[in-house]
Image: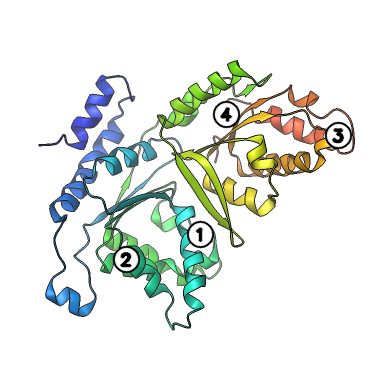
C-alpha cells in the first residue's frame, strides 16, 4: 500500500527536505480523503442515467485552503497533487486557468451557441477529474460573472477542485463591481468544498529571504549559482511554464513554480511587452527572479523603458524581486535619454531589497 500524505510529509521532514509545521500536518487528512476518493473512483464508468442526463460521476468533495502568504499552501498542494495516482488531473495557477477559459469562451461564442460556458466546461470535464488551483483570487469582473456557472457545471460533471487562496471565500471579489451577482459562487464553494484555514504563524517565503542577499552584481557565474540556490530553496526545484493570455496574446514564462517566476532581462524586456503584460504577471506571481540586467543607455532605450515599467509594476504590486545585474542600481543607467528618470527606478530597486519587502501583500 502506498504511503499516506502524512507518512510522506513526516518522511520528508525527517530527511530535512521540509520544515515540519503542525498546521500543515493537520491539513493532510483532508487531502488524503480526497486522494483516496479519487483513486477509489478511478476507472469507474459513467452509469446509464449519467449518460442519459449528461452528468458525470459524483465529484469527490474538494478543499479550499486559505491563509496568509508563505504559509506553505503551495507546498501542500504539490505534495497532494503529485501523489494522486490518476492521469486525469491538472495543477494550474488560477489566474492562468481563467485566462484560458476566457479565450475558450471567445472561440465558443463565434459558433453562435446560446450558452458558451457549457461547451467550455464540458471540454474541461471531458479531460479532467481533478483540478488543483494555486492562489484563487477574483479581481476581474469578466471572471466574476462566469465562475459560478462554470464551476457548477464542472462539479456536476464530476470534477473535484482543490485550491489555495490568500482569502477566506467570503472575501473573494471583495468590493467588486456587481458583487451581489457573485455571491452565489461563494455559496457554491462552501457547499461543494471543505474550507480550511492554514493557521501557521510562520511565513516560510519571508523566512527564507529574511536578511538574505537578493540583488547580485556583477551578473556572472557566482551570481547565477547564488540565484539558483535561492530558486531551489523557494520552489524545491520544480518548474512548469506559466501561461498568461493578455489581450488575445499568450505570455509564457518558462520557469514558474509555487508563485515564483524566473526569467532573464531579455525575456521580459527584450520582447515587445507592455504594461498589461507586466500587470498580468504581477497578479500571477509573488516572487520574480530576474537575471542578467545589463547596463542601460540610448542604445537599448526601448528595453530600458520596458524595464522601468516592469519595476514600477512589481513595486506597486509588492512583488518580491531577486535580481542579478551588471552594476549597482544607481550605476545601471548613468547617461543618455531617460537616465534622469531612472533615478526613481534605482531608488525602488534599493527599496525592494529590504528584508521585509512585500510582507504586507
Expressed as whole percent of the image width and height from the top left, the position of residue 195 reads: 30, 52
Q: Is residue 184 visible?
A: no
**Between residues 267 and 30, which one lies in front from this camera angle?**
267
For label 1, the residue is 99
Q: Contact (CB < 8 A) between labels 1 and 3? A: no
For label 2, the residue is 154
| In-image side of 115 versus 1 (left or right) | right
Asked if 208 appears above or below 92 in the picture, the reply is above
Expressed as whole percent of the image width and height from the top left, the position of residue 223 reads: 60, 19
Q: Give the Cα separation between the discs numbered 2 and 1.
A: 17 Å
**Between residues 91 and 213, which one lies in front from this camera angle?**
91
Disc number for residue 120: none
Which residue lies at the image location 37% right of the left edge and 74% below the top edge?
118
Q: Earlier in the sequence, mark 1 or mark 3?
A: 1
| In-image side of 209 versus 297 (left or right) | left
Farthest left residue in view:
1
Q: Earlier in the sequence, mark 3 or mark 4?
A: 3
User: SS for tag 3?
Assistant: loop
| Mark 1 or 4: the one toward you | 1
Q: Contact (CB < 8 A) between labels 2 and 4? A: no
Disc number for residue 356: 4
Q: Earlier in the sequence, mark 2 or mark 3?
A: 2
User: SS for tag 1?
Assistant: helix
Q: Give the Cα separation between the discs numbered 1 and 4.
A: 31 Å
- Residue density around tag 4, few if under 14, some if 14–19, many if 20 or more, within 10 Å: some
Q: Give the Cα separation between the discs numbered 2 and 4.
A: 40 Å
Disc number for residue 339: 3
Q: Earlier in the sequence, mark 2 or mark 1?
A: 1
- Residue density around tag 1, few if under 14, some if 14–19, many if 20 or more, within 10 Å: many
Classify residue 60 by image quadrant: bottom left
Amino acid at each position: 500500500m502506498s504511503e499516506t500524505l502524512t507518512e510522506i510529509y513526516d518522511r520528508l521532514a525527517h530527511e530535512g527536505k521540509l520544515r515540519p509545521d503542525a498546521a500543515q500536518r493537520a491539513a493532510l487528512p483532508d487531502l488524503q480523503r480526497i486522494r483516496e476518493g479519487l483513486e477509489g473512483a478511478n476507472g469507474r464508468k459513467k452509469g446509464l442515467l449519467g449518460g442519459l442526463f449528461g452528468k458525470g460521476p459524483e465529484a469527490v468533495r474538494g478543499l479550499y485552503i486559505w491563509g496568509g502568504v508563505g504559509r506553505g499552501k503551495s507546498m501542500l498542494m504539490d505534495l497532494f497533487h503529485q501523489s494522486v495516482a490518476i492521469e486525469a488531473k491538472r495543477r494550474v495557477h488560477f489566474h492562468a486557468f481563467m485566462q484560458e477559459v476566457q479565450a475558450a469562451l471567445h472561440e465558443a461564442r463565434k459558433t453562435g451557441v446560446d450558452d458558451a460556458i457549457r461547451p467550455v466546461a464540458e471540454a474541461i470535464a471531458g479531460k479532467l477529474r481533478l483540478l488543483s488551483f494555486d492562489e484563487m483570487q477574483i479581481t476581474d469582473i469578466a471572471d466574476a460573472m462566469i465562475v459560478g456557472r462554470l464551476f457548477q457545471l464542472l462539479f456536476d460533471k464530476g470534477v473535484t477542485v482543490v485550491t489555495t487562496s490568500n482569502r477566506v471565500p467570503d472575501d473573494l471579489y471583495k468590493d467588486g463591481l456587481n458583487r451581489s451577482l457573485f455571491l452565489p459562487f461563494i455559496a457554491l464553494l462552501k457547499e461543494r468544498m471543505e474550507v480550511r484555514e492554514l493557521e501557521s504563524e510562520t511565513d516560510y517565503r519571508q523566512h527564507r529571504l529574511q536578511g538574505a542577499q537578493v540583488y547580485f552584481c556583477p551578473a556572472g557565474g557566482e551570481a547565477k549559482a547564488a540565484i539558483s540556490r535561492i530558486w531551489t530553496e523557494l520552489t524545491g526545484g520544480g518548474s512548469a511554464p506559466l501561461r498568461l493570455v493578455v489581450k488575445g496574446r499568450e505570455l509564457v514564462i518558462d520557469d514558474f513554480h509555487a508563485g515564483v517566476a524566473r526569467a532573464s532581462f531579455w525575456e521580459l524586456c527584450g520582447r515587445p511587452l507592455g504594461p498589461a503584460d507586466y500587470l498580468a504577471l504581477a497578479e500571477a506571481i509573488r516572487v520574480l527572479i530576474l537575471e542578467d540586467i545589463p547596463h542601460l543607455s540610448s542604445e537599448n532605450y526601448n528595453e530600458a523603458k520596458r524595464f522601468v515599467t516592469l519595476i514600477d509594476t512589481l513595486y506597486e504590486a509588492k512583488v518580491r524581486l531577486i535580481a542579478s545585474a551588471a552594476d549597482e542600481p544607481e550605476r545601471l543607467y548613468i547617461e543618455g535619454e531617460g537616465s534622469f528618470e531612472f533615478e526613481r527606478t534605482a531608488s525602488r530597486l534599493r527599496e525592494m531589497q529590504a528584508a521585509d519587502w512585500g510582507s504586507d501583500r
